[in-house]
Amino acid sequence: MVVKKRKSAKVEAVVLDEEKLHKLIASLSVGGGEDGVREVAQTLQSCLELTEPVQQIQLVIKAGSQLEALSEEPSDGALLESCLHTLTLVYTCLQAKNPLRRTIASALGSVPAWLQEQAVHSLSACLSDCLSNPTSEQYPHITDTITACLDGFTLGERCINKLLPEVMQFLHKGLSEYLHQNSGLTGRHIAQAQLMYCCLATVKASMLVMQRSQETIGSSLQAQHTHTKLEDTLSSLLGCYTHSSLMWKHVDMYSDPADGKDFIQSVQSTAGMAIVLLIRSAMGGGDEVASVVCSLLRGSAQGLDSAPRWLQQRCEGLCSSARPAGVSLYLCHGALAMLSWKGALPGPQWEQLLLLVPNTLLDLDVSIKESSTAMVVSRVLTLWSSAALDCLQGERRVCPPRLQQSLSGGSELQQRLLEHIYSHWEHPLDGVRHQTRALFRNLLLLHQHTCSSIFDPAEDSYITELTLSLLGLEWHMRGKYGSLSCLVELYGASHLLDVQPQLPVSLLGLMGDQNLSPYASDLLERLFVSHKAQLGSEAGAVDTTGSEAWMEVWHKTWVTPLLLVLCRAKLDQTTYILDYFLPKLLRCSPSSLTHMVQALQDTPPCSTGPSGSRGALGALMTCLRAARAQGVVPSSKEVCGGAWCPSPCSNKHWYTNMIK
């Protein structure tokens, strides 16, 4: 196995142009000031004069401690202002992953309360200078700086809120320039890939700013006086997001098309989330937001009336009938990821949106031929089922009638989702199969929540029919095993055994197939573990004498069929039983080894089974070998001294010879 070395962040020294460096040192060398402030200035001056990065980090930490120790505002604040300016200027000049940047953020974050506003002002001034007239080469660095200010840096977050219009305008300017540059890079794959990385980073940065500035954006847009600058910037950003979700569909960046498609989907998916987030930021969390998103999913301008005029105009452009089908997919993902689905839904439009998302995805699923897109659809459907569960879980609340009807088992929506599951559980991509199983489990949970008055699965006609339908399918369908495992998890093994008592025998019969044995053994393990827990729980509730008669039922269900196969099947047909099933059974119930030995004593150990089989003695030897491998076998003295040892072989060498 190859162990991948963890990359450590590279520590680089502060690099400033000579003129700027001399100015900073000179500002820190000004005489006067109180002793505490002079100490900070001297420490920072020493830091700037050094070229060894680790020593610079140590000096910044020292300066942070000295700032924290300042007890009162000095009468002459010029030197203190120079200290703060030095820290904030160096902060905005450092690369994103340089540990020195985080050290400076920690130092600024530890300043006394009376100094915090001054620190925010200093950082805002430096960042504003960066935002004012940047070159295109500086865009990625400034974007990283904006993101860093929102990464656990309280003063940085206050700075971003203070400069919100400027920050949003810069991000729009950078994003629009990237989108414009793309048209001239056809065929230049490396340059186009780098451009897409910058585009993705800018969209993510703008989303982070909006998420951390919800109140500021909302209060600015809802104020009585006009805020055309912020509205115009948000409107232009929404246009860029829309462009990002559409423009990459014909990009061919890589020699391996799969790599390019995966990254393009990442850009489109992020753009879809950004569109919904901007709508939520501009309109709040009421029913009107859900109405607008519903209109976008349908590709219809109806329902946009509740949006502000500037937002309505941008959304109308996204409702074009000529847009690619994938836009609806990424808008669905955006709605699920960026809107809050926990608790009761705010209104009927939210219920409509929750039911519109899966139908939109299922309509897309019919026309999808690419595996990578099928993966996205499966993942978003599972995300939807989790969001639907979030609406129903938590405090006991009455499920709205429309939701209850649509989300319960047997509904038209559930039937369509089951058809999607059945058509994808054999998909060649592991990820699609995994998402399909997770979706099936969530559908069962949705049914449980919408039909909470039914506790016994035997009384639930939908679950009974679903179980019979699954059990009636051919065993070579691998998705069948995962779905049955979900039924075991949520309803217990007893439910499946009541419907099909011969299920253990059927599954043991599949253990001779190399391709199916891993799936069969996994389902068998879930069944016998669940069955044992159920029997024990039921016995404990009615039997207070401590009797373990219920274990006989469990042995009859699981151990007896196993012993029959070991005695009578040919050796090559039991290879996978010994590899997969028997060790799991012994780990679940080590004490069952005694039952196995006693059961095999009923047949003379020297007798033989059908031709090519082990017979009882061979089966006994096999069980003991497996038990020894699992560490549950008793010593040879215990075996030969008690009821373990069959009478025809009761000598001291019998056990030893068998397990060699």
Image: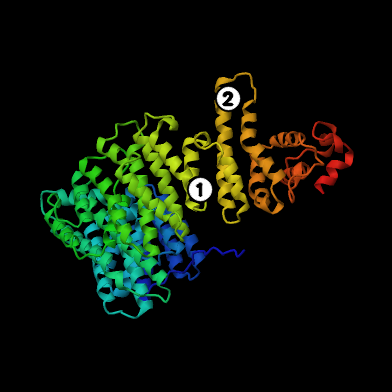
Mark 2: which amino acid?
Answer: Ala
**Residue type highlighted by circle 1:** Tyr
The residue closer to the viewer here, 74 or 179, is: 179
Q: Which numbered disc, 2 or 1, marks the residue closer to the eye?
A: 1
Residue at x-position 75% and y-position 47%? 614
Determine which of the numbered discs, if any, sits on residue 481 in the image: 1
Q: Position of residue 103 (x, y in %)?
A: 44, 58
Quadrant location of the N terminus in the rendered image = bottom right
Task: Tell whether 589 sits left or right of 368.
Answer: right
List the residue tagged with mark 2: 539
- What x and y, as percent, mark residue 126? 30, 64
Which one is nearer the viewer's eye here, 518 or 334?
A: 518
Mark 1: few, some, or many residues within 10 Å (few <14, many ≥20)?
many
Tell whether 463 sits left or right of 301.
right
Q: Which tag, 2 or 1, sits closer to the chain's start?
A: 1
In three-dimensional space, the C-alpha distance between marks 2 and 1, rounded to whole angstroms, equals: 29 Å
Q: Quick check: 233 above or below 582?
A: below
Q: How crowded is mark 2: few (under 14 residues within 10 Å), some or many (20 or more)?
A: some
Q: Under tag 1, what secondary structure?
A: helix
Q: Which residue is drawn at 21% across and 51% down?
A: 294
* Camera-side residue of 475 and 548: 475
- Which quadrant of the figure has residue 398? top left
What mark, if any, has residue 549 been given in the picture?
A: none
Residue 108 percent coordinates (x, y): 38, 55
Q: With respect to residue 83, does 507 lie above or below?
A: above
Q: Residue at x 59, y 49 (%)?
A: 510
Q: Position of residue 113 (x, y in %)?
A: 34, 47
Tally the numbered discs: 2
The reply to whether residue 112 is visible in this rendering is no
Q: In this view, does 214 lie to the left or right of 190?
A: left
